[in-house]
Image (tube, grey):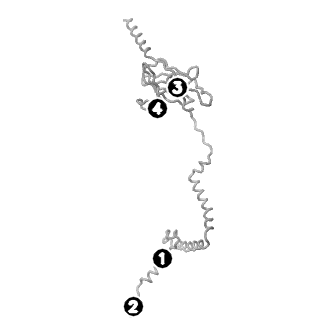
Amino acid sequence: MLRWNLILTLLFLLAHTVSAYSLRGFLDSTVPNGPHLRYSPTTEVILRSADAKYKAYIRADGESFVFLNVTAGSYALSVNSAEHVFPILRVDVAESDVEVFLTHRGNEWEFKGPRQPYPIELKPFAPAVYYQYREGFNILKLFKNPMLIISLLTLGMVFVLPKIMDSLDPEQLKEIQQQQAKSVPSAIANPMNFDVASYLAGKSSGPSASGSSASQSKSAGGPRSRKP
């Protein structure tokens, strides 16, 4: 009985070893027109599925990694690095082939992204940024302030309007001053009868105008005395 248990255990281990694979890859360290990137020895490459999880570290050459005894299945491969940000890959391990696809977090697992080469090649997107530096003084953003724009327009009107008044014809300027002299006192005397539209149109309005119109209507339509 003990012999049969030992044989079954050996057969199980042999079948598990036969169905296990080794996955190889590397982190690309080349930079156009610059020095090669150097990755920290603590950089982790994680291969994860719903049922299994494998972890590998950067080897002595500074860029390659190996996963040993990986069973067949579909995995998500990610890199934990404190210096760089890497893409996420989908790795499908089959009995005869290994397929690698580009994916991202939140993507439906049924949808495969662009095909990637094998051995696995990972190139960082950008350096990892943990701090937001304080922005310096920018004069262009100062002029985008609405309050500053309104103040500049008001200041411009203070200098421009007198020049416009000086460029008017003396007769027109005198006429405008007379209309203002007629309309403003009437508005001050009886502000309830002040007609803003007439004032803006250059016409005088007020109690004097209303009184004159009333007197004209009385003289025109009032009762006449009969002769005996």
Q: From the viewer's perspective, is residue 211 above or below residue 111?
A: below
Q: Position of residue 223 (x, y in %)?
A: 40, 85
Name the quadrant of the C terminus: bottom left
* Location of mark 3 (residue): 121
Question: Mark 4 or mark 1: which is in front?
Answer: 4
**Label 4 SS:** loop
Dot 3 or dot 4, earlier in sequence: 4
**Label 3 SS:** strand
Question: Mark 1 or mark 3: which is in front?
Answer: 3
**Label 2 SS:** loop
Dot 4 or dot 2, earlier in sequence: 4
* Location of mark 1 (residue): 210
* Location of mark 4 (residue): 105
Q: Which of these two is toward me, 81 or 1?
A: 81
- Circles 4 and 1, Cβ within 8 Å, touching? The answer is no
Dot 2 or dot 3, earlier in sequence: 3
- Residue at (60, 71) in percent of width and height: 173
Q: From the viewer's perspective, is residue 219 above or below residue 166?
A: below
Dot 4 or dot 1, earlier in sequence: 4
Q: Give the distance between the C-alpha atoms of the residues marked 1 and 2, in whole angstroms.
A: 29 Å
Looking at the picture, which amino acid does disc 1 mark? Ser
Looking at the picture, which amino acid does disc 4 mark? Arg
Q: Give the distance between the C-alpha atoms of the residues marked 4 and 1, in whole angstroms.
A: 79 Å
Q: Position of residue 155 (x, y in %)?
A: 61, 59
Q: Which mark is residue 226?
A: 2
Q: Give the distance between the C-alpha atoms of the residues marked 4 and 2, in whole angstroms.
A: 104 Å
Q: Position of residue 94 (x, y in %)?
A: 42, 21
